[in-house]
Each structure stands twice: as structure tokens, then as C-alpha cells.
Image (spheres, rainbow, N blue to C red):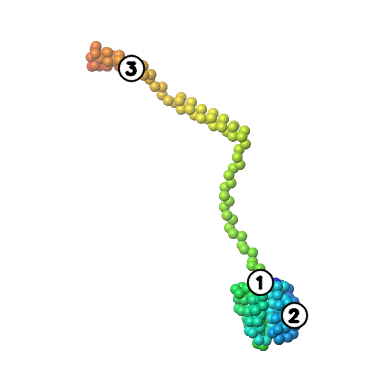
Amino acid sequence: MRVYIISDNIDYGIAASNMLSGGGSSVIISELRSNDVKDLLTDLKGSAGSYDMTVMICTNARDNAISANKLPGVRAVVCKDYEDASEAVANTRANVVVVDSTKLTKKALSDIASGLLEQQAPAPAATPARARAKAPTQPAPMPPQQMQGHGSLLSSIKQDISKGVSSIRKPSVPQASQGQAGSGLLSDIKKKGAKKAIQDALGLGDDQGQ
């Protein structure tokens, strides 16, 4: 984070610079030592767009923040502690933090710097999510020659199955033979009688039938 510090008190300016640079920020301290609002706004306007954040340490912070917000591209807020600084960066997207030097302590300045650094720190890398099950990929299409080979094999298997099924079927009695056997039996029944005709057809003699 690139930070520009405008401070009417050089000690506070250096302290803020050390705190922010110690957190990894690149800090430049303005040479301006004035409480005049016109001088502050002129310095602020000249640095606008060149830095990620400007820290203005001055008296009459509230009025100076109102005046600063009239400049194009400036979003200034007054900060007095860690919560203010953190809120300014996270929610209001402020790019100018105005600190009242009349009631400032090094503890409060340290808290403000910590709030700015915490919001500007890069988010930790996300923990890799549980590996997702890979969708099954479709097999590559077979070459034409291989497909023809598989087609011939399937055709041969079908023919073998058909032959096997035909071979296990019981041979059916020809219809003509059935008709002839039936006609002969009826003729014998008419001539010999039902009992005698059935015995003769079964190969049974008179004694066996009795």
C-alpha cells in the first residue's frame, strides 16, 4: 500500500510513517507543516491519485475532512481509533484518513495504523476444496477398421447362438405323419372297436388287455 502522510506535527508524521512502513507499506511524508486548510487541501489535491491512502494529521480534523470531500476523487473520513480506521477502508472505501492531532496519542496512532494495515493486507490463500469426483470421460471413437472387426465378431456370435438354440429344440413330428397316424387309428376303431384298436396300437394282446 502506498501512503502519503500530511502532518502538522513532524513527530506524529514520523511515528505514523514507521508504523505503516513496518507493516509493509511504502510511505512518503509531506514537507508541509501548516494548519491552514487551503495549504492542506492544495497538498492533498497534488497527491490525489498517486497514493492508495493519505493520512492527514492536523487540528480541526472534522472541518478539514468536510473540505477535503469537496475535492474530486477524495473520500475522507475522521478516524480516532482502530475501529474507525478499519471501517473506513472496509466499508466506506475511504482514501483519506483525517486524524485530530490535538487529542492524539501514540497508542491511538498505532491503533489507527493497525486498522489500515489489516484491511489492506492480502487475504490468505483459500484452502483447496475437497477434490471433486471427475466425471467419466467418454471413450475415444474406434477407428473404422476396428469397428468393422467388432461387427464381424458380433455377427459370428449371433450365428453360433442361433445354431445352438436350433440344435437343442426337439424335432417336431411332421404334420403329414401325424395325419396318417390319426387316420389309421380311426379306421381301426371303426373296424375293430375302440378297445381292440387301442390294444393293437399299443401292442397289447387280448390276454394283456384283460
Mark 2 crowdedness (10 Å alpha carbons): few <14, some 14-19, many ≥20 = some
**Whether residue 114 can be seen here:** no
Q: Residue 167, image x and y in percent?
A: 46, 24
Q: Residue 136, image x and y in percent?
A: 57, 47
* C-alpha distance separating marks 1 and 3: 105 Å
Circle 2 SS class: loop
Observer-side mark, 1 or 3, equals 1
Please give the residue where the numbered disc 3 appears in the rendered image. Answer: 179
Comparing 13 with 171, the one in front is: 13
Mark 3 crowdedness (10 Å alpha carbons): few <14, some 14-19, many ≥20 = few
Label drawn at residue 30: 2
Q: Is residue 83 left or right of residue 38?
A: left
Q: Identify the residue at image location x=24%, y=16%.
A: 194
Circle 3 SS class: helix
Q: Residue 51, image x and y in percent?
A: 71, 73
- Sequence-wise, the earlier of marks 1 and 2 is 2
Q: Quadrant of the rendered structure where residue 20 is?
A: bottom right
* C-alpha distance separating marks 3 and 2: 125 Å
> Is there a contact, CB below 8 Å, between mark 1 and mark 3?
no
Observer-side mark, 3 or 2, equals 2
- Sequence-wise, the earlier of marks 3 and 2 is 2
Q: Residue 120, image x and y in percent?
A: 66, 71
Q: Quadrant of the rendered structure where residue 41 is?
A: bottom right
Q: Quadrant of the rendered structure where residue 166 is?
A: top left
Which quadrant would the N terminus be assigned to in this image? bottom right
User: Three-letter amino acid code at disc 2?
Assistant: Ser
Please give the residue where the numbered disc 1 appears in the rendered image. Answer: 120
Relative to residue 93, is residue 150 depicted above or below? above
Q: Identify the residue at image location x=66%, y=86%.
A: 60
